[in-house]
Image (tube, helix red, strand yellow):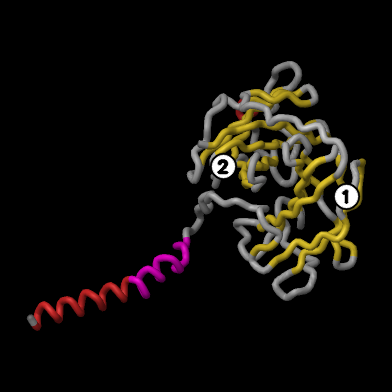
Amino acid sequence: MRQLHWATRTGLIVLVLLVSGVVGYVVTRPSPVVHHVPAPVAPHSDGLSDTQDGFRFHPLTVPQARGTDLPIAFQIIGPSGRPETSFPENQTKQLHFFVVRDDMQSYQHVHPELRGDTWHTTASVPDGGAYRMYVEFVGRDPSHPIVLGSAFIIPGDTTFVPLPEPAAVSAVDGFVVTRPDGVAKPPVGKPSTIRLRITDASGAPVTSPEEHLGAYGHLTGFNAILHSVTHLHPSQRVGTALPDGELTFQAAFAERGEHRLFLEFRVGGVVRTAAFTVFVT
């Protein structure tokens, strides 16, 4: 009986230790350090909130009606409670700013300028409806920038455009961007590769696009329902030719469903944007 009683007590003590100590250790231990190997892309949604890691997106001037080059002003309130006025460069810019309509038919990517303690930029609002703006910058973790989001509404009649079905080809300004994998469906929660091949009006591959934001291409994905942002990281380094005009991007989607991907690339000094709908399973 004493042995049984002792065993029972021992089992309870072990159980308590497991719950209070070991489980906490598993949850809170830091990731192992990997030297000379890029960190894997982890599933992560951004832009669903106006606060993250002690930073807060504080809009001051927001478009109230449709128009072109409408002023936008905002502050980034830091953990100290004061406006932040300096961030490490991320793809050659301190801040990246996006404005997207909820049906994904309007996409803009601009770079605000600092005046005093307030960031300023402009955006065009071609139609009424619900819009969301995102600001991206490097916070505490340089390997994963912070993205904060805030919505605004433009009143008046709105022409809603259904989200295009997934397709393997997107044409823009005489160029054609093709997914060599067709309408392949990336898996949710796992690293995957998005391949995009750029050809010109003659059908010749664009093997040497010009640098844009420190890379050959900039690709951003938005969940069509949640409007969260997914980062996609280019594999090719500037200065190396693109075999057959193909760019590859590393991605890890955190949600299932339709995502709208916007590829920006520069040729002849002009930045073009090709859009794709991708279904994540």
How far across and down, in percent of the image, does residue 268 sit?
82, 31
How far across and down, in percent of the image, does residue 39 sit?
52, 53
> In the picture, residue 58 is in which quadrant?
bottom right
Q: Secondary structure at mark 2?
A: strand
Question: CB of mark 2 within 8 Å of CB of mark 1?
Answer: no
Mark 2, residue position: 250
> What amino acid type should be assigned to the residue bearing mark 2?
Gln
In the image as oriented, which residue stretches furthest toward the top?
202
Q: CA distance from mark 2 to mark 1?
A: 34 Å
In the image as oriented, which residue stretches furthest toward the bottom?
2
How far across and down, in percent of the image, does residue 266 sit?
77, 35
> In the picture, residue 84 is in which quadrant?
bottom right
Residue under the image location 68 percent in, 28 percent down: 164
Please give the count of numbered marks on the rendered protein: 2
> Viewed as shown, does residue 120 lie left or right of 91?
right
* Dominant secondary-structure state across the stretch colored magenta: helix
Q: Nearer the viewer, mark 2 or mark 1?
A: 1
- How crowded pointer 1 is (Cα within 10 Å; few <14, some 14-19, many 20+) is rated as many
Residue under the image location 15 percent in, 81 percent down: 6
Q: Secondary structure at mark 1?
A: loop
Q: Is residue 237 visible?
A: no
Which of the pair 256/270 is nearer the observer? 256
Residue 35 is inside the magenta segment: no
Q: Is residue 232 visible?
A: yes
> What amino acid type should be assigned to the residue bearing mark 1?
Pro
Residue under the image location 64 percent in, 46 percent down: 226
Which of the pair 194/89 is nearer the observer? 194
Mark 1, residue position: 63
In the image as oriented, which residue stretches furthest toward the left?
1
- What span is colored magenta in the figure? 19-33
> In the picture, residue 238 is in which quadrant?
top right
How far across and down, in percent of the image, does residue 194 sit?
58, 35
